[in-house]
Amino acid sequence: MGSRSRTVGAAALAVCSLSLAACGSSRSSSVAATTTSTAAGSTTTTPAPITGSLAVFAAASLTGAFNSAKTTLTGANSGLDLTYNFAGSNALVTQIQQGAPADVFASADTKNMDKLVSAGLVETPVTFARNKLEIAVAPGNPRHITGLTDLARSGVTVVLEAVGVPAGDYTRSVLASQRITVDPKSLETDVKSALAKVTSGEADATVVYVTDVTAAGSSVEGVTVPDSLQPDITYPIAVLKATENHAAAQAFVDSAVSGDVQKALEAGGFLPPQ
Amino acid sequence: MIVLPLVGLLERVSWSTLLSDLSAHDAYVALRLSLETSLGALAIALVLGLPLAWILARRRFPGRSVLRGLVTLPMVLPPVVGGIALLYAFGRRGLAGQLIYNLTGWRFVFNTSGAILAEAFVSMPFLIVTAEAAFRSMDRRGEEAAATLGAGPAYRFRRVTLPAVAPALAAGAALTWARALGEFGATITFAGNLPGSTQTTPLLIYLDIESGHEATALALSLVLLAVSLGVLVGLRDRWLGNP
């Protein structure tokens, strides 16, 4: 029994490596996938499984949703070798421009995606998620913050993201439109570190995305910013022209627009792409 | 491997706008703050580190090697971990920080004193290590002679021990200062980032790169590079002797 299953395993491995070789040369991945799943003798072959290696470069704010989607995706596609590279959208653009091997780029703002569009490095991007701003306060809201105007109150310690950090720029434009002058005690480099200042009790409030408040669970509480004040926060995703696994890259993008990735995004508090 | 990144940096610096980049308000403020906080950190390191180094070098007591390990820990600790540790100790809800805050309303986070504390935490080991080595390796006969002539411990330390270790101490102090000047991770994690109060030069460099102000970032990098190199070259020639 033991030796028999080992033989089967070895055969499956051999098929896998053969199919990987096929992927490497021609990237006609669906054929290889069918062979693999037959060898494994289990999963159905519809829809066509996604196979091969896929590197998705994604904005840090997508970490939670994309990671939970990964479990679903790799569970349904045994031949898929999915790896993520999470960082600030700015940093990812720089990495891609310097030749980092990415297949898909998911940005937290259109500004950074546009840099790659104008450099001719990506195919036409599509919007796959939207987000909202929310005020994050300590659990129980001890400072009784009910809206943006409370951030200007004296005695309330507020941190914001720095100018140039997308969340910081969005927040500033909303505050400016309401003529609210906030005196932040620190200009954090990203939403996570701004939120950390609230969860650690150093700051009373900050402004982050709804999804960050959701992800932080019970360590913070969200105070809604009215829809009428919400800026247009959209997340574009695109296949990189230099990809060597176009089928898988396109499948990931499709899933982000309406598929398992989209389900994970919605569970994480993201809004669907209109 | 060491020289090439430096050349890369020098090659990208915009020399024609260097002075205007540096005199930009934020850059000037950050440089001045860096100078103040790094000198503050050096002062703390000297006051706390020197006695500690002396005890480590001259006293035998249980747990000495553990203590020696502990004081050098920040040298190898990832700076961000140091920042988190400082937060748990000196933050508004930290072990000591909470007490201080409740009693006096004073807080280190979002305050220049927090930046100084972070820099001192990271740089003090450099002083302790060099000072301990100097105390340990110095010729003890001078002290013994002074003792037999009736000199008290304080007088002996001031007139015999200190002059003997002065060159090594100066080198250690310079290293400590340079390390404090370059501190980034613990400061941004613990103290925050606000121009004029906690935004030291390395923080501004990071932020400038993140937000696309490459010219200012490179100009400031060049200043830190020049200062650090100056300190190290100066150390070699002035205090350690040129071989």
Image (cartoon, coloured by chain):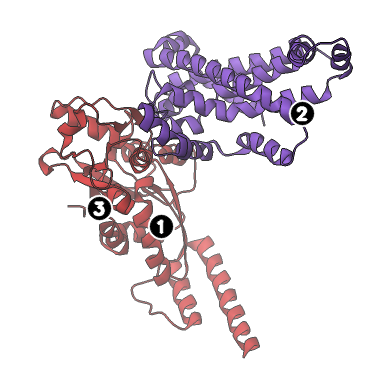
Residue occupying the point 37% across, 71% down = A48
Which SS class for mark 2? helix
Most distant residue in the bottom direction: A1
Rendered hue of chain A is red
From where the camera sits, is residue A224 visible? yes
Which subunit holds the residue at mark 1?
A
Rendered hue of chain B is purple
For the residue pair B114 and A195, the one nearer the viewer reads as B114
Q: Which mark is residue A246?
A: 1
Which SS class for mark 1? helix
* Three-letter amino acid code at the position of disc 1: His
Q: Are marks 3 and 2 on the same chain?
A: no
Most distant residue in the left direction: A228
Residue B48 vertical placement versus B162 (above, below): below
The C terminus of chain B, quarter of image: top right
Q: Which mark is residue B57?
A: 2
